């Protein structure tokens, strides 16, 4: 990896450790892994976007936790704000690092649509994010189901699976999705 990627990794890791949500680091690292699996020739900007796509969660973790108890995980305004804030934070960090403006613009563009997708690489990032979610984050949401209800968590699981664009990514995620739904019934 490049020096810039390593600096982003340090920033992301420290941000999530500082907010007390260090479990999320593995999700981000595995998103990078899945981007590479889905697109072996992924460029530096796409890998940086994969690693940093949820950076806003670290910055606003306490606020987000409270909001999620009061609204749907799939709330359009919440998703748009999350994408915008994550893109703003990583853009600011990359500027401070003196990154190439083309890389900054590309990372910002990718992160700004990592939940909804749009172009081919935004869709790829979204798909890798979903795969990693099912691989790593399901236990967190199963625990949340006890507080906020199974139906709300099921909506999140369904949304994370149904938003996957590529058939290859859908096949990878399917076993974890089906297991998550099964486990949710037992909560």
Image: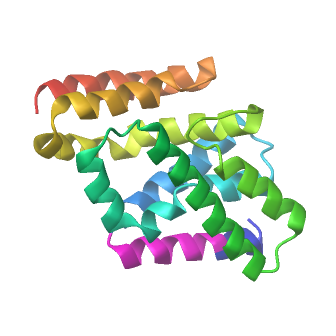
Q: Is residue 145 left or right of residue 100?
A: left
Identify whether 52 is placed above or below 162.
below
- Could you tell me residue 62's position as x and y percent? 31, 67
In front: 110, or 10? 110
- Could you tell me residue 37's position as x and y percent? 65, 38
Q: Residue furthest front?
A: 77
- Could you tell me residue 53's position as x and y percent? 58, 55
Colour approach in the figure: rainbow
Corner quadrant of residue 18: bottom left
Corner quadrant of residue 11: bottom right
Q: Who's the residue at 33% across and 64% down the image?
A: 63
- Could you tell me residue 132's position as x and y percent? 47, 42
Q: Is residue 52 visible?
A: no
Q: Is residue 83 left or right of residue 100?
A: left
Q: Who's the residue at 52% across and 56% down the image?
A: 54
Q: Is residue 82 visible?
A: yes
Task: Count up the numbered dots.
Answer: 0
Q: Who's the residue at 64% across and 41% down the image?
A: 125
Q: Quadrant of the C terminus?
A: top left
Q: Is residue 82 left or right of residue 183?
A: right
Q: Is residue 114 left or right of residue 81?
A: right
Identify whether 181 is placed above or below 138.
above
Q: Quadrant of the N terminus?
A: bottom right
Q: Main secondary structure of the magenta part?
A: helix
Give the residues drawn in magenta, as a range.
8-20
In front: 109, or 39? 109
Q: Is residue 123 magenta?
A: no
Identify whether 159 is placed above or below 43.
above
Q: Who's the residue at 65% across and 50% down the image?
A: 112
């Amino acid at each position: 990896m490049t020096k810039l990627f390593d600096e982003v990794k340090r920033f992301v890791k420290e941000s999530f450790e500082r907010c007390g949500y260090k479990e999320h680091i593995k999700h981000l690292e595995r998103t990078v892994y899945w981007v590479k699996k889905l697109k072996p020739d992924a460029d530096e900007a796409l890998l940086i976007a994969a690693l940093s796509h949820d950076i806003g969660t670290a910055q606003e973790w306490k606020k987000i936790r409270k909001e999620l108890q009061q609204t749907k995980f799939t709330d359009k305004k919440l998703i748009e704000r999350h994408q915008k804030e994550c893109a703003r934070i990583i853009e600011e960090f990359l500027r401070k690092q003196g990154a190439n403006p083309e890389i900054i613009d590309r990372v910002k563009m990718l992160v700004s649509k990592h939940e909804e997708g749009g172009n081919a690489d935004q869709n790829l990032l979204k798909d890798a994010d979903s795969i990693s979610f099912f691989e790593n984050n399901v236990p967190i949401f199963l625990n949340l189901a006890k507080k906020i209800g199974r139906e709300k968590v099921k909506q999140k699981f369904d949304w994370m699976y149904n938003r996957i664009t590529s058939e290859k990514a859908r096949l990878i995620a399917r076993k974890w999705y089906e297991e998550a739904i099964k486990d949710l019934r037992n909560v």
